[in-house]
Image: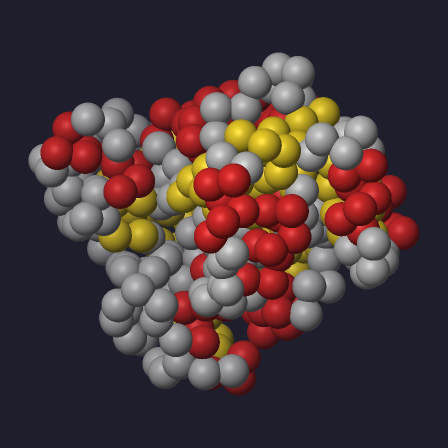
Amino acid sequence: MSNTMLAAVFHEHGERDVIHLERVPLPEPGAGEARIRVHACALNWLDVGIRRGPQFGAVPLPLVTGVDVCGVIDALGPGAQGWQVGDEVTLYSLVTCGVCEFCRAGDVTVCPEHQIIGEHMNGGLAEYMLAPARNLIAKPRRLSHIETAALPVVAGTAWHMLITVARLQAGESVFIPGAGGGVASMGIQIAKHAGATVIASTSTAEKMAKARDLGADHVVNYRDEDWVEQALALTGGRGVDVAQDLVGAMTWADSLRTLARNGRMVVCGSHSGKQFDLRIPQIYHRQLSILGANGATFNELRRVLALADQGVLRPVIDRVLPLEEIREGHRILEEHDHFGKVVMQIA
């Protein structure tokens, strides 16, 4: 085996041209670690955000991003238990302290010491990567490496938002904006699995058809000036019980408008903007709840992967690209030129 590998690396923050394919040293697994021969790694908005500049504190540079990984264990470090070389795995990307009050309570997504594989340490946009063995999860048997890589972040996040935090119930209704996004495309499926009525929004007739194919009961085109009124009319003017917003400032006002009295808006992203001019009276007059959701727990990820293995949830893949086209993958995300996940095939 060569002592180097190919990786998509950036040494500084900036536009897409800061990403370079380089030969870098092959990493050796330390205590409790596994080395994974990466077969596929899906892109997330996190990859774009980290490349542009750190949002929540500095990240180490140079850096290889990539949190949605599927591959095969090719080496194990001392004390790495529960796995063997040759096992097909994906991974839980959150590395937590395990000892704080939140970790002890099982609320690991708000661990103040948490780190993310692919943000605070090198990730999967490379031929090989390291991960703590305790973060590994067996690849679903019925799914390919590419299909599996399309799931962890978006499926886990959507489940945590809708089921754990918003407590979506059978018979309720939910509004999901930006149906072409990864979390939204999984949110549609998870909400239907929960027994909810789904109203989604997107921007083209083609994407509207794809959202319906995923199970959305109703789809509106957010380019229509009266799309909020259209959405409200679908509820008889009442509004929806839950809005799943992962876009940010661009959609907050409209997501709030879609809510019924006592409605809940659950949020997990802000890539369209972090500041929003909130009309406070609408919150208390209509008794609305705004709920934050951050990632997913290890067991939530195992749950959604099991549902995908059973065929209840299906990966939504827009296209598959070789690692050599990593800049194109970033362009697709930045220009919203996709429905579902962009997956980089590495092996």
Quadrant assignment, res 315? top right
Residue 122 against residue 261 in the figure, above or below? below
Q: Residue 76: give x, y in percent of width and height.
A: 24, 41
Q: Residue 4: give x, y in percent of width and height.
A: 35, 67
**Residue found 47% across the figure and 52% down from its top:** 280
- Tell me if 26 is positioned left or right of 203 in this view: left
**Residue found 89% across the figure and 52% down from its top:** 205
Residue 204 against residue 295 in the figure, above or below? below
- Tell me if 164 is positioned left or right of 62 in this view: right
Q: Residue 124: give x, y in percent of width and height.
A: 42, 55
Taking the image as drawn, is residue 228 in sight? yes
- Nearest to the observer: residue 342 or residue 195: 195
Residue that lies at the very extreme toward the left in this rendered image: 99
For the N terminus, the quadrant is bottom left
- Nearest to the observer: residue 282 or residue 335: 282
**Residue found 69% across the figure and 34% down from its top:** 239
- Tell me if 141 is positioned left or right of 9 in this view: right
Residue 207 against residue 98 in the figure, above or below? below
Quadrant assignment, res 56? bottom left
**Residue found 29% across the figure and 75% down from its top:** 61
Q: Residue 338: give x, y in percent of width and height.
A: 72, 58
Taking the image as drawn, is residue 88 in sight? no
- Nearest to the observer: residue 155 or residue 118: 155
How many numbered discs, if any? 0
Residue 246 against residue 321 in the figure, above or below? above
